[in-house]
Protein backbone atom coordinates (compact mmCIF):
# COMPACT_ATOMS: atom_id res chain seq x y z
CA UNK A 1 0.00 0.00 0.00
CA UNK A 2 1.10 3.55 -0.69
CA UNK A 3 0.90 6.18 1.98
CA UNK A 4 2.12 9.75 2.29
CA UNK A 5 2.17 11.68 5.54
CA UNK A 6 2.58 15.41 5.94
CA UNK A 7 2.61 15.98 9.69
CA UNK A 8 2.05 19.73 9.58
CA UNK A 9 -1.26 20.98 8.29
CA UNK A 10 -0.33 24.60 8.86
CA UNK A 11 3.09 26.24 8.73
CA UNK A 12 3.73 29.93 9.21
CA UNK A 13 7.07 31.67 8.74
CA UNK A 14 8.33 35.18 8.21
CA UNK A 15 9.68 36.43 4.91
CA UNK A 16 13.35 35.62 4.57
CA UNK A 17 13.25 32.76 7.05
CA UNK A 18 14.11 29.19 6.07
CA UNK A 19 11.20 26.85 5.54
CA UNK A 20 10.94 23.08 5.60
CA UNK A 21 7.78 21.17 4.76
CA UNK A 22 7.96 17.61 5.96
CA UNK A 23 6.90 14.55 4.02
CA UNK A 24 7.24 10.89 4.93
CA UNK A 25 6.12 8.00 2.81
CA UNK A 26 5.41 4.33 3.02
CA UNK A 27 5.92 2.13 -0.01
CA UNK A 28 7.53 -1.26 -0.44
CA UNK A 29 9.06 -0.68 -3.88
CA UNK A 30 10.91 2.19 -5.52
CA UNK A 31 8.60 5.17 -5.57
CA UNK A 32 8.66 8.41 -7.44
CA UNK A 33 8.14 11.37 -5.16
CA UNK A 34 6.74 14.73 -6.10
CA UNK A 35 5.80 18.04 -4.60
CA UNK A 36 2.74 19.76 -6.01
CA UNK A 37 1.68 23.30 -5.14
CA UNK A 38 -1.73 24.93 -5.21
CA UNK A 39 -1.82 28.71 -5.04
CA UNK A 40 -5.02 30.32 -3.89
CA UNK A 41 -7.93 29.22 -6.10
CA UNK A 42 -5.62 27.87 -8.80
CA UNK A 43 -5.04 24.41 -10.12
CA UNK A 44 -2.48 22.05 -8.68
CA UNK A 45 0.80 22.18 -10.47
CA UNK A 46 4.00 20.25 -10.23
CA UNK A 47 6.68 21.98 -8.22
CA UNK A 48 9.41 19.38 -8.42
CA UNK A 49 10.10 15.67 -8.61
CA UNK A 50 12.89 13.75 -7.00
CA UNK A 51 14.29 12.15 -10.15
CA UNK A 52 15.00 15.47 -11.83
CA UNK A 53 16.95 16.86 -8.87
CA UNK A 54 16.02 20.40 -9.88
CA UNK A 55 15.62 23.51 -7.79
CA UNK A 56 12.37 25.23 -8.66
CA UNK A 57 11.59 28.70 -7.29
CA UNK A 58 14.39 28.15 -4.81
CA UNK A 59 12.84 24.95 -3.44
CA UNK A 60 14.73 21.69 -3.20
CA UNK A 61 13.80 18.25 -1.93
CA UNK A 62 16.01 15.25 -1.36
CA UNK A 63 14.75 11.72 -1.25
CA UNK A 64 16.03 9.96 1.85
CA UNK A 65 15.26 6.29 1.43
CA UNK A 66 16.62 5.40 4.84
CA UNK A 67 14.22 7.75 6.58
CA UNK A 68 11.55 7.38 3.85
CA UNK A 69 11.31 11.14 3.67
CA UNK A 70 11.11 13.77 0.96
CA UNK A 71 11.13 17.08 2.80
CA UNK A 72 10.77 20.32 0.85
CA UNK A 73 13.15 23.12 1.74
CA UNK A 74 13.80 26.72 0.86
CA UNK A 75 16.48 28.82 2.55
CA UNK A 76 14.67 32.17 2.28
CA UNK A 77 10.87 32.14 2.08
CA UNK A 78 9.03 34.76 0.03
CA UNK A 79 5.47 36.01 0.45
CA UNK A 80 4.53 34.58 -2.94
CA UNK A 81 5.41 31.13 -1.63
CA UNK A 82 2.23 31.16 0.43
CA UNK A 83 0.21 28.24 -0.89
CA UNK A 84 -0.94 24.70 -0.21
CA UNK A 85 1.82 22.14 -0.74
CA UNK A 86 1.17 18.49 -1.39
CA UNK A 87 3.67 15.71 -1.30
CA UNK A 88 2.77 12.86 -3.64
CA UNK A 89 3.99 9.39 -4.39
CA UNK A 90 3.68 7.31 -7.51
CA UNK A 91 4.21 3.62 -7.15
CA UNK A 92 5.35 0.95 -9.53
CA UNK A 93 4.06 -0.33 -12.82
CA UNK A 94 1.07 -2.10 -11.35
CA UNK A 95 -0.23 1.02 -9.69
CA UNK A 96 -1.35 2.41 -13.03
CA UNK A 97 0.28 5.75 -12.43
CA UNK A 98 -1.72 6.27 -9.27
CA UNK A 99 -0.64 9.39 -7.42
CA UNK A 100 -1.17 9.21 -3.69
CA UNK A 101 -1.21 12.58 -2.00
CA UNK A 102 -0.44 13.62 1.52
CA UNK A 103 -2.98 15.74 3.35
CA UNK A 104 -1.20 18.93 2.41
CA UNK A 105 0.56 21.69 4.30
CA UNK A 106 -0.74 25.24 4.12
CA UNK A 107 2.29 27.51 4.10
CA UNK A 108 1.86 31.15 5.05
CA UNK A 109 4.77 33.51 4.63
CA UNK A 110 4.25 36.67 6.64
CA UNK A 111 5.79 40.02 5.69
CA UNK B 1 -4.63 25.86 -25.54
CA UNK B 2 -5.26 24.79 -21.95
CA UNK B 3 -3.78 21.36 -21.31
CA UNK B 4 -6.50 19.97 -19.04
CA UNK B 5 -9.83 21.74 -19.00
CA UNK B 6 -12.90 21.09 -16.90
CA UNK B 7 -16.40 22.43 -17.22
CA UNK B 8 -18.15 23.90 -15.42
CA UNK B 9 -15.86 25.74 -13.03
CA UNK B 10 -18.66 26.26 -10.52
CA UNK B 11 -21.75 24.14 -10.04
CA UNK B 12 -24.50 24.85 -7.54
CA UNK B 13 -27.37 22.40 -7.46
CA UNK B 14 -30.04 20.99 -5.18
CA UNK B 15 -29.99 17.70 -3.36
CA UNK B 16 -31.30 14.85 -5.41
CA UNK B 17 -30.32 16.28 -8.77
CA UNK B 18 -28.10 14.55 -11.33
CA UNK B 19 -25.14 16.48 -12.74
CA UNK B 20 -22.12 15.95 -14.94
CA UNK B 21 -18.64 17.43 -14.99
CA UNK B 22 -16.65 17.26 -18.19
CA UNK B 23 -12.91 16.98 -18.61
CA UNK B 24 -10.74 17.13 -21.68
CA UNK B 25 -6.97 16.97 -22.14
CA UNK B 26 -4.99 17.84 -25.25
CA UNK B 27 -1.65 16.48 -24.06
CA UNK B 28 -1.95 13.11 -25.73
CA UNK B 29 -1.84 11.38 -22.36
CA UNK B 30 -3.12 7.85 -21.93
CA UNK B 31 -4.24 8.13 -18.32
CA UNK B 32 -6.86 10.38 -16.77
CA UNK B 33 -8.09 10.75 -13.21
CA UNK B 34 -10.71 12.26 -11.01
CA UNK B 35 -9.70 13.54 -7.59
CA UNK B 36 -11.91 14.95 -4.86
CA UNK B 37 -10.66 17.75 -2.62
CA UNK B 38 -12.74 18.07 0.51
CA UNK B 39 -13.26 21.09 2.73
CA UNK B 40 -10.04 20.30 4.57
CA UNK B 41 -8.16 20.38 1.26
CA UNK B 42 -7.48 16.67 1.40
CA UNK B 43 -7.01 15.20 -2.09
CA UNK B 44 -8.25 11.70 -2.71
CA UNK B 45 -8.29 9.75 -5.92
CA UNK B 46 -11.68 8.56 -7.11
CA UNK B 47 -11.09 7.00 -10.52
CA UNK B 48 -8.39 6.45 -13.08
CA UNK B 49 -8.76 5.47 -16.71
CA UNK B 50 -6.06 4.30 -19.07
CA UNK B 51 -6.95 4.38 -22.76
CA UNK B 52 -10.67 4.43 -21.91
CA UNK B 53 -10.31 1.48 -19.56
CA UNK B 54 -11.05 1.80 -15.84
CA UNK B 55 -7.94 0.91 -13.84
CA UNK B 56 -8.55 2.52 -10.45
CA UNK B 57 -11.90 2.64 -8.74
CA UNK B 58 -11.62 3.70 -5.14
CA UNK B 59 -14.35 3.33 -2.59
CA UNK B 60 -16.74 5.75 -4.17
CA UNK B 61 -20.56 5.54 -3.99
CA UNK B 62 -22.24 4.03 -7.02
CA UNK B 63 -23.90 7.37 -7.60
CA UNK B 64 -20.59 8.46 -9.14
CA UNK B 65 -20.02 7.08 -12.61
CA UNK B 66 -17.09 8.04 -14.81
CA UNK B 67 -17.34 7.81 -18.56
CA UNK B 68 -14.49 7.93 -21.04
CA UNK B 69 -15.70 8.24 -24.64
CA UNK B 70 -12.09 8.46 -25.84
CA UNK B 71 -8.72 8.77 -24.19
CA UNK B 72 -8.82 12.59 -24.31
CA UNK B 73 -12.05 12.82 -22.29
CA UNK B 74 -13.11 11.64 -18.88
CA UNK B 75 -16.48 12.84 -17.66
CA UNK B 76 -17.93 12.40 -14.19
CA UNK B 77 -21.64 11.87 -13.73
CA UNK B 78 -23.18 12.10 -10.29
CA UNK B 79 -26.69 10.86 -9.54
CA UNK B 80 -28.89 11.85 -6.61
CA UNK B 81 -26.53 14.48 -5.28
CA UNK B 82 -26.11 14.72 -1.52
CA UNK B 83 -24.88 17.52 0.71
CA UNK B 84 -21.68 15.58 1.41
CA UNK B 85 -20.79 15.63 -2.26
CA UNK B 86 -19.94 19.31 -1.98
CA UNK B 87 -16.24 19.59 -2.78
CA UNK B 88 -13.81 20.61 -5.46
CA UNK B 89 -13.36 17.94 -8.12
CA UNK B 90 -10.11 17.89 -10.06
CA UNK B 91 -9.50 16.13 -13.30
CA UNK B 92 -5.93 15.22 -14.17
CA UNK B 93 -3.97 13.38 -16.83
CA UNK B 94 -0.57 11.79 -17.10
CA UNK B 95 1.45 9.65 -19.47
CA UNK B 96 1.25 5.99 -18.61
CA UNK B 97 4.39 4.79 -20.23
CA UNK B 98 7.14 4.48 -17.66
CA UNK B 99 9.77 6.09 -19.82
CA UNK B 100 7.74 9.25 -19.99
CA UNK B 101 7.48 9.63 -16.28
CA UNK B 102 4.36 10.02 -14.27
CA UNK B 103 3.83 13.74 -13.87
CA UNK B 104 0.19 14.62 -13.56
CA UNK B 105 -1.36 17.75 -15.06
CA UNK B 106 -4.46 19.06 -13.36
CA UNK B 107 -7.52 20.90 -14.50
CA UNK B 108 -8.61 24.07 -12.72
CA UNK B 109 -11.17 22.22 -10.63
CA UNK B 110 -14.96 22.24 -10.42
CA UNK B 111 -16.38 23.62 -7.20
CA UNK B 112 -19.58 21.68 -6.58
CA UNK B 113 -22.00 23.00 -3.98
CA UNK B 114 -25.05 20.96 -3.12
CA UNK B 115 -27.79 22.87 -1.32
Image (cartoon, helix red, strand yellow):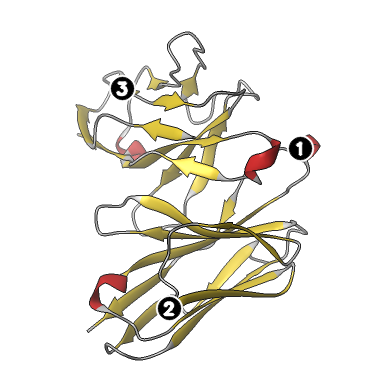
Dot 2 crowding, Cα within 10 Å, few <14, some 14–19, many 20+: few
Residue A85 can be seen in this image:
yes
Q: Nearer the viewer, residue A12 or A105?
A: A105
Chain to which the residue tagged by mark 2 belongs? B
Q: Element under label 1?
A: helix
- For the image, the number of numbered tags is 3
Q: Which residue is mark 1?
A: B98
Q: Are marks 2 and 1 in contact (CB under 8 Å)?
A: no
Residue B102 can be seen in this image:
no
Q: Tell me residue B75's x, y (percent).
A: 58, 75
Q: Tell me residue B109's x, y (percent).
A: 45, 65
Based on the displayed image, in which of its 4 quarters is residue B52 positioned?
A: bottom right
Q: Which residue is mark 2?
A: B63
Residues beneath discs 3 and 2 located on the same chain: no
Chain to which the residue tagged by mark 3 belongs? A
Residue A37 position (above or below residue B20): above
Amino acid sequence: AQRVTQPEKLLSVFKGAPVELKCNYSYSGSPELFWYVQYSRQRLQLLLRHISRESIKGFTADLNKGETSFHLKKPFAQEEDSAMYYCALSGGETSGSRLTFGEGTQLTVNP
Amino acid sequence: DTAVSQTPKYLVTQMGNDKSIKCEQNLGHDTMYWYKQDSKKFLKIMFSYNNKELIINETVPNRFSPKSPDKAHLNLHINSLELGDSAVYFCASSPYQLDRGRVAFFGQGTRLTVV
